[in-house]
Amino acid sequence: MKNFTSVHDVENINALVQEALMLKKAPYAFADMGKHKTLGLIFMNPSLRTRLSTWKAAKNLGMDVAVMNIDKDGWALETEDGVMMNGDKVEHIREAAAVLGQYCDVIGLRSFPKLNDKHEDYSENILRKIINYSRVPVVSLESATRHPLQSLADLVTITEMFQEWPKRKPKVVLTWAPHIKALPQAVPNSFAEWMGKAEVDLVITHPEGYELAPEFTQGATITHNQEEALQDADFVYVKNWSSFHEYGNILTKDKNWMLTNKKLYTTSNARVMHCLPVRRDVELAAEVIDGQNSIIIQQAGNRVFAAQAVLKNILEHNF
């Protein structure tokens, strides 16, 4: 693997999942693999789990890690080509990316969408240009359209928790949840895309108008009836997202979509997942977060080993 930006960069997702589970049992087994290699973590947006888990994953492999909040610590970046830079943008992404490639052997980049212009966000302009001009392997730490490290950790968690493979596939439900503000589609896009490549039965449920882009939901059952979707579910992934078709808009804040313990009664004692951060009693009932069905902390812990499996693969195939 040269870059890690989506499930399409992975040759064998089952092998990558098993690698992550192996590393969870022996996190320091390859502690010298990344010696004298530097991972640059570049953040254009806030982060807790992605920042710390990827940092720890790199250190487990013996890498040096440099972290930069480029939105606060760096120069204002111009990302468009062919413009005269006589405004407030000080540095062009062409030079910035090229310089990062001089200092870092691998780059991790986080850049959220603005949710104003669908075409601009879904073009992945910033991610593509960092890849093109840095000329070193790039790992997406969440982009405008996907969050592949989160999705890999999600699949690692489901694989770890589900004991009935290969007798049957788990039923995995991705359910929309209410929120106080508009959020990107990156996490649900990515989760649906990864589950579509995994041995699961995926059901996506959301209010009308919250359909994701069809390219991410191939093979999934999609319904506007949450109660119907939850029946016999083995895993329930709770996440808010704004409208894709009415781009970036909030079409409803219907509190009835919040997952509660009562709603779990019709499931197969489903494990409940969320990528975090979560707004208690807005997106997800506190009784569920704190209850025995919640695996969100284990899910967050697996972020380390998902990132470690990706970095190990990159180190093995590029150096």
Image (spheres, rainbow, N blue to C red):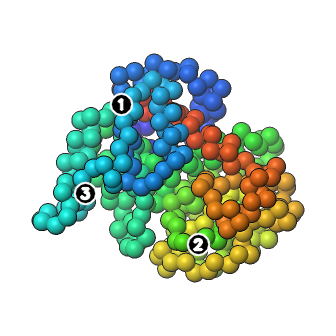
Relative placement, left or right, of 26 versus 223 is left
In front here: 206 or 37? 37
Tell me, for residue 180, which label it has, or none. Answer: 2
In front here: 283 or 306? 283
3D distance between C-alphas at marks 2 and 3: 29 Å
Visible residue check, residue 214: no
What amino acid is at disc 3? Ala
What amino acid is at disc 1? Thr
Q: Which residue is drawn at 47% across and 28% down?
A: 59
Tell me, for residue 76, which label it has, or none. Answer: 3
Q: Which of the 4 image quadrants contains residue 112?
A: bottom left
Give the mark, 3 or 1, whose residue is nearer the N terminus: 1
Secondary structure state at the residue bearing disc 3: loop
**How busy is the neighbourhood of tag 2: few (under 14 within 10 Å), some, or many (20 plus)?**
few
Relative placement, left or right, of 134 versus 12 is left
Tally of numbered tags: 3
Residue named by callout 1: 38
Q: In front: mark 3 or mark 1?
A: 3
In front here: 103 or 233? 103
Q: Which residue is drawn at 77% across and 52% down?
A: 290
Q: Which residue is drawn at 27% across and 50% down?
A: 74
Give the mark, 2 or 3, whose residue is nearer the N terminus: 3
Q: Where is residue 270 in the image (x, y as percent from the top left)?
A: 80, 54
Q: Which of the 4 image quadrants contains residue 45?
A: bottom left
